[in-house]
Image (cartoon, rainbow, N blue to C red):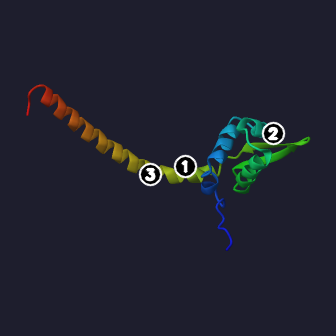
Amino acid sequence: MARAATTADAFNAVAEPRRRQILDLLAGGEKPVNELVAVLALAQPLVSKHLRVLREVGLVEVRDSGRQRVYRLNARPLKDIDDWVSGYRRWWSGRFDRMDVVLAELKESEDGDEHGDQ
């Protein structure tokens, strides 16, 4: 049975923590692969595999500079992720607003107990 593609889009690509770490590093500016290998303390083939996945979904771009391959972040595909997450901000905001009300009621109740109110 063929394995399902798990890295077909930016959502799947950034699900892997090391790939997010690579994106964070590249957010600071373009870097050659050997620098990424040193910072990540991973084997070069493993870093190259993660970079290949990120390149396939368009999250990184590469250019040759002499004998080095230099990678840079392309954040445009992250907009889809941000748009999706943003849809839940209202939901979370509503939850936090209700939690604030409950906490205020609890505090009011505790303050009343301390002063002998019942």
Res. 7 image quadrant? bottom right
User: Which mark, by number, is residue 82?
Assistant: 1
Question: Mark 2 and mark 3: span between their CA atoms?
Answer: 38 Å
Question: Mark 1 and mark 2: span between their CA atoms?
Answer: 30 Å
Above or below: residue 27 compared with residue 76? above
Residue furthest to the top in view is 115
Query: In this rendering, which labeled residue sits more in front, label 2 or label 3?
Result: 2
Considering the image in quadrants, where does the C terminus appear? top left
Question: Mark 3 and mark 1: span between their CA atoms?
Answer: 10 Å
| Helix, strand or loop at mark 3 | loop
Depth check: give the residue in front, 13 or 78: 13
Q: Amino acid at mark 2?
A: Asn
Query: In this rendering, which labeled residue sits more in front, label 1 or label 2?
Result: 2
Q: Going from the N terminus, do you reach mark 2 or mark 3 first?
A: 2
Q: How many marks?
A: 3
Q: Tell me whether circle 3 and circle 1 mark residues in contact (CB < 8 Å).
A: no
**Which residue is the site of mark 2?**
34
- Which residue is rendered at x = 29% and y = 39% of the image? 100
**Which residue is the site of mark 3?**
88
Q: Amino acid at mark 1?
A: Asp
For disc 1, the neighbor class at 10 Å (few under 14, some 14 to 19, many from 20) is few
- Which residue is rendered at x = 8% and y = 30% of the image? 117
Above or below: residue 10 compared with residue 112? below
For disc 2, the neighbor class at 10 Å (few under 14, some 14 to 19, many from 20) is some
Left or right of residue 86: residue 18: right
User: Which mark, by number, is residue 24?
Assistant: none
Q: Amino acid at mark 3?
A: Tyr
x and y percent of residue 23 in the render?
Answer: 67, 43
Depth check: give the residue in front, 104 or 40: 40
Considering the image in quadrants, where does the N terminus appear? bottom right
Res. 3 image quadrant? bottom right
